[in-house]
Image (cartoon, coloured by chain):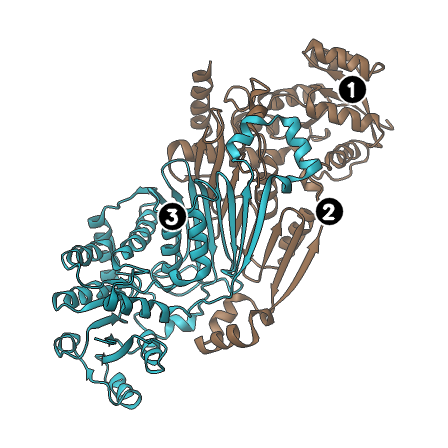
Chain colours: A brown, B cyan
Amino acid sequence: MAKVKLGIIGLGQQGGAYASFIKEGRVGNMEIGAICDTDPEKKKRANEEYPEVPFYDNYIDMMESGDVDAIVTCVPHYLHPEMGIEALKRDIHPLLEKPAGVYTKQVKEINEFAATKPELTYAIMFNQRTNELYQKVKEIIDNGEIGAIRRTNWIITTWWRPQGYYDAGSWRATWDGEGGGVLVNQAPHQIDLLQWICGMPEKVYTKAQYGYQRNIPVEDDVTTVFDYGNGATGVFITCTHDIMGTDRLEIHGDKGKIVVDDSKKVTVKRLNTPESEMSDSMSMQDVMKLFQGEGPGSIYQEEVLEFESVWGGQHVAVLENFAANILDGTPLIAPGSDGINGVELANAMHLSSWLNKEISLPINEEQYLEELTKLRQQEK
Amino acid sequence: MAKVKLGIIGLGQQGGAYASFIKEGRVGNMEIGAICDTDPEKKKRANEEYPEVPFYDNYIDMMESGDVDAIVTCVPHYLHPEMGIEALKRDIHPLLEKPAGVYTKQVKEINEFAATKPELTYAIMFNQRTNELYQKVKEIIDNGEIGAIRRTNWIITTWWRPQGYYDAGSWRATWDGEGGGVLVNQAPHQIDLLQWICGMPEKVYTKAQYGYQRNIPVEDDVTTVFDYGNGATGVFITCTHDIMGTDRLEIHGDKGKIVVDDSKKVTVKRLNTPESEMSDSMSMQDVMKLFQGEGPGSIYQEEVLEFESVWGGQHVAVLENFAANILDGTPLIAPGSDGINGVELANAMHLSSWLNKEISLPINEEQYLEELTKLRQQEK
């Protein structure tokens, strides 16, 4: 095939955006194979905007029609894994919207099934991985340029949402509709980036506020402490009620420090000598001299990198990379199996806050599902 | 009396500095009444540098000599409360070095006793409270200019200390000598400032690393989560192993945000409309317009205030204020009874990390003392 025929499941905000990217020719190796939605209004819209594209109101029918080589799941999070599995069963390549699912148990299922079909392309829409800024940060860490990580700290409170946003869809910010709040809907990008760049923690402690500043049953404010297991720790803070939100990531290592401001500016300080060597060789007199005389600037090299802010603009790159992997095996930027890490972290944060204690990873997934099910039932 | 005659207990680094400030005439309303130290070397030094000043090797003798109106306790932290009590008993005004003590039980004792002697001046060396920057931040908060606090976040990792610093004194960074590490020796200033400006939390969760990057039995790395009891939360991070340390305080409120960088620059953003009203009145379309068109800058007024960095330079101001309170009742900047809050917070952080769970304030002080005593005994 010359172009991958994509079946778009769900013509909402994301599905609509992908359809228009492809229609506008922005994804060179992809065309719209079919569109599927259960909502008659969406059928009307599809007929108007994409009159030549086949429309289905059942995604199984679409996958069995021969119209599509691949699908993308722009539907409520709970459905991502099962739709992915149904696609894989029919030798259709699935691209999951983020998050990969709501709870790890369902994500494990698709990951295990996908492992039996290695010839198929299974990917996830972690569009932020195509952001050059975070690719650069990952490269610096991976190269060991700032040494072993001692501390990570991300305040990412730029996800402001007014009450009207939540009121606009009855499924929004509910346990039964989404399976959570900011951790499941807005912050999965940063949760993925953090684990992609800095690795997974061993333990998680979370203080989450449910319906703190918004009239929703799920979390709108989260403070998490990570324990990476070797003394290194991290903090992850997010919320949806800070209209002047902060986006500041700091990574402190044995040999340097990276500070990312507003996902635009990266300040890298590389120590001339590893910190532990300085500690071992310096007297307090040397220290006073250092801070009063030469200034600490003399002990490190600073580099400042500025990037264009491209939040939200990289979906096209993921679509293209997904199609390229199908067509010629180009390595995936975001393999589908990676999606479980973010889900596991979000689950761990919920579970820790519900139990009010630090919990170890991997989490007890049965316990998580039980607690989540209770919350879903309470809503009905 | 025209000038307060100060008895300096302990002619180490701090005591020596105070003696020279007074000798140089930098504290106009104070003179050195006497100096006390148990170390013969210090006696020699005192005789050389302050030949006209009476010297004692027993602080009780000094207090009963008639040479002093007031004392300052530049001795190991454990001794601050008992020396203060002995002073009060003799109608001598005590100025405690920070921290007020190592554990709340002993600090309560002096506070209760001091309350029976309201005619005496009882103060504590929280010199950072005279820092104009933090006075300004407190004023903004107290005036309600940024509304009710929703989140506090202080990364204060500028307390770098090399191994040589710890090796220079056998009492340093031990449970028996100091009763802790960075929380007891370096960070008490910020712990006091935070509670002075933002109030005390109701609950504390701490992850502390003991001897993580330094060969010491006490904590050299701390991550704390505060729960202020009304949904508001906070994070406090400190360590002694970051040679390119960060000092960044962020306070997020209903009506604005304050960010303090490097204890030098204060950025205040005041919302034109309280956040909750914006949430209630805005649609998602308004939001898109806001962020893409006018930019969020139109919703708030920004003010940037720059201050000279004066870390360590304000001891003179506290000495002067202490003497002024004795002489004419000038209000105290740092009443001695305030010292318990910082000690309680540091104790809560230790206890939470030892028990690995969130704990409520006031802490169980018997349990704290029991655990601390165990650690002291293990060292012997």
Other residues around mark 2 within 10 Å, as few (<14) / some (14–19) / many (≥20):
few
Quarter of the image with the N terminus of chain A in it: top right
> Which is nearer the N-term, disc 1 or disc 2?
1
- At horizontal 44% and vertical 61% (from top left) the residue drawn is B132
Spatial CA distance of label 3 from label 1 is 52 Å
Question: Which of the labelled discs sits on residue A68, or is there none?
Answer: 1
Other residues around mark 3 within 10 Å, as few (<14) / some (14–19) / many (≥20):
many
Label 3 or label 1, whichever lies nearer to me, is 3
Spatial CA distance of label 2 from label 3 is 37 Å
Question: Which of the labelled discs sits on residue B206, or is there none?
Answer: 3
Three-letter residue code for mark 1: Val
Using the rendered image of the protein, determine whether residue A205 is visible from the camera's viewpoint.
Answer: no
In terms of image quadrants, where is residue A24? top right
Label 2 or label 3, whichever lies nearer to me, is 2
- At horizontal 55% and vertical 29% (from top left) the residue drawn is B279
Residue B338 or A300: which is nearer the viewer?
B338
In terms of image quadrants, where is residue A182? top right
What is the x, y in percent for residue A247? 59, 45
Question: Which of the labelled discs sits on residue A229, or is there none?
Answer: none
Other residues around mark 1 within 10 Å, as few (<14) / some (14–19) / many (≥20):
many
Three-letter residue code for mark 3: Thr
Q: Residue furthest top?
A: A40
Q: Is residue B327 left or right of residue A113?
A: left
Three-letter residue code for mark 2: Glu
